[in-house]
Image (cartoon, rainbow, N blue to C red):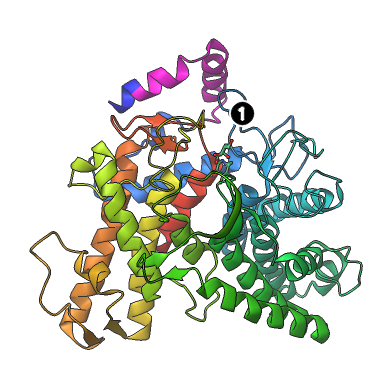
Amino acid sequence: MMRQARLNRCCRGAMKALLVSALALSGVVASSSIQAKPNGTIVDWMQSQEVIANHNLLRNINPSDAARGVVVASPSRVAPNYYFFWVRDAALVMDHVVNLFLEAKDTKSKNYYRELIWDYINFSRGNQVTPNRSGGLGEPKFNVNGSAFDGDWGRPQNDGPALRALTLTKFAYALMAEGDYVAVRDRLYNSAIPAYTVIKADLEFISHHWREANFDLWEESYGDQFYTRMAQRNALLVGARLAAKLDDQGAADWYNEQAKLLATEISKHWRSDLGAVLITLNRKGGIDYKNSGLDSAVILAALHSDSGDGFFDVTDERILASARKIEATFAQIYPINQNKNLGVAIGRYPEDRYDGYRTDREAHPWFIATAGFAELHYRLARKLAKSGSVTFTKKNLKFYQSLYPAGQTPSFINEGKLMGGDEKFQQLLTALVEKGDGFMRRVRQHTADDGAMSEQFNRYNGYMTGAEHLTWSYAALLTAVRSRP
Ligand code: NOJ
Ligand code: NOJ
């Protein structure tokens, strides 16, 4: 089945086939020596897929015909053309590269990642000062030579600067740990206004513009966005800490103050009538058919914007209530989910019409969403283990009960509290990891034999579809794998 999927894909264009074989010859493409292992355990597969995903992700950074620092969303240039630098995708991908940098043991690989990150920083600073149709820092994507993309698009998208600031702040701390305050002050965070350093410019933009309506991460709906606001709040909190450390206390106070105001607005996204977080409030434009109000970006928000204070994080009962509803909904609408041996394939939102090529079709499950659900369960298990207890509430109870197949939920999952010493607590953690593994089995099922991951996989037959080698798919797989307890 997967072999067929691969043939279909490479036969789409003779050019592409040529390119693939040329790359294979040059040893750039994952060769048969690093095959995924569909018959081994899921942990075995995750280990081999981690190697492939890292390789394929890095291949989408700095392609030879692009300016240094470019992360393409996908190497696909036609049907669909994803050969652009998306601020959001790049920030999420480079966050993983910063992790690789932090973990690198030998000087050579450390310097390799360091250089990739500096290239990205320079390119990003270029983005910030390039005039564009958003008229500010919310421009969602740039051409690979760094010029502004001037076609019609859903703009602005204000999650970009926030995600970028988060990624770069992590790097700034790494540099300061090495004692390199000079590089940080010169190029990442300097209190000078008007801002000429990347992080400072992002924080100024966020703190002055977070009230403005903008397009969501799916680039379709115009209004007040939960995902975006979560990223903005986290960036402001993290940025405030950085500002204080770099003697910019006035700015730190201002960022903290804005983060607090944002929290009030974010809380309004919880809708008790819906029993879930509503992704967009005060919609002013864009698509109008998201009737269920459910959207997996709520879960991605909890994953990408955890500010360490429990606010809408993976333990938050409102996030868990949303997760249960989203999963149950996708379980119903995608035919491939009739296979109950695998976790539920998750898409962007139930009414989605973007099939990876056009916006008037039935959409499919996405790797980033399905891997995101695995990560949610893994990270929840970790956090609960660390905190040493779990409290079942009216809002989260169904989530915990549905970790088990119908009729098999142990009776201890009932309102109340379970403590770490209790063996039932251990059972619960195991159930969470197993549930997460189910989502990863789903991801494995639809990943090509050679580890290639596109954007979506077909809801009827499971074949991959949409942009090939989507860089974000690899990043999502990698963060999920690395979050497993
Ligand atoms: C492509 C993608 O960004 C997708 O999210 C969006 O629905 C369409 N473009 C809008 O045209
Ligand atoms: C469509 C997705 O909806 C959007 O989130 C992403 O930024 C672009 N594709 C590029 O990958």
Q: Main secondary structure of the magenta part?
A: helix
User: What amino acid is found at the position of numbered circle 1 in the picture?
Assistant: Asn
Q: Residues within 10 Å of mark 1 (few under 14, many from 20)?
A: few
Quarter where residue 168 is shown: bottom right
Left or right of residue 163, residue 442 in this image: left
Looking at this rendering, what residue extends furthest in the left direction? 407
Magenta segment boundaries in residue numbering: 5-29
Q: Quadrant of the C terminus?
A: bottom left
**Above-or-below relation of 11 to 109:** above
Left or right of residue 413, residue 44 in this image: right
**Above-or-below relation of 15 to 67:** above
- Whether 268 is among the magenta residues is no
Write down the residue under mark 1: 81
Return the x and y of residue 5 as percentages of the image width and height: 36, 24
Quarter where residue 256 is shown: bottom right
SS type, badge 1: loop
